[in-house]
Image (cartoon, rainbow, N blue to C red):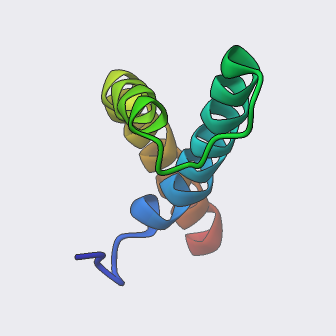
Amino acid sequence: MLSAHDPILFRQLPIIAQIIQDETWLEGERRRAPVSSDDPVVREKVCSIVLTIGASMREQLSQQVAGQGQDQAA
């Protein structure tokens, strides 16, 4: 369930959507045929990427959100 109060989660969604789009395209290139984003190979690769970069992506976005909060307070 998505939390409406988690601004970091909403900043991650477009990044993850781009990863899905990129991996779908790449798998289509590998197979030389169109594939769906629901393809098991695409899903596995996307999960692997998100698990690999998820913590650092969240940390980076947390810092951005914190910096914006400081800018608004000033």
Q: In which quarter of the image is residue 43?
A: top left
Q: In which quarter of the image is residue 74?
A: bottom right
Q: Furthest-left residue in view?
A: 1
- Could you tell me how many numbered marks the image carries? 0
Give the residue displayed 67% in from the left and 44% down from the top: 21
Q: In this view, does 55 lie to the left or right of 18?
A: left
Q: Residue 32 placed where, x, y %?
A: 77, 22
Give the residue displayed 62% in from the left and 72% down from the top: 72
Q: Nearer the viewer, residue 68 or 45?
A: 45
Give the residue displayed 43% in from the left and 48% down from the top: 62
In the depicted structure, whether residue 31 falls above or below residue 5 = above
Q: Furthest-bottom residue in view?
A: 4
Q: Residue 6 placed where, x, y %?
A: 35, 71
In the depicted structure, whether residue 70 falls above or below residue 3 = above
Q: Residue 60 placed where, x, y %?
A: 49, 36
In the depicted structure, whether residue 10 falls above or below residue 52 = below
In the depicted structure, whether residue 69 falls above or below residue 54 = below
Q: Residue 55 placed where, x, y %?
A: 32, 32
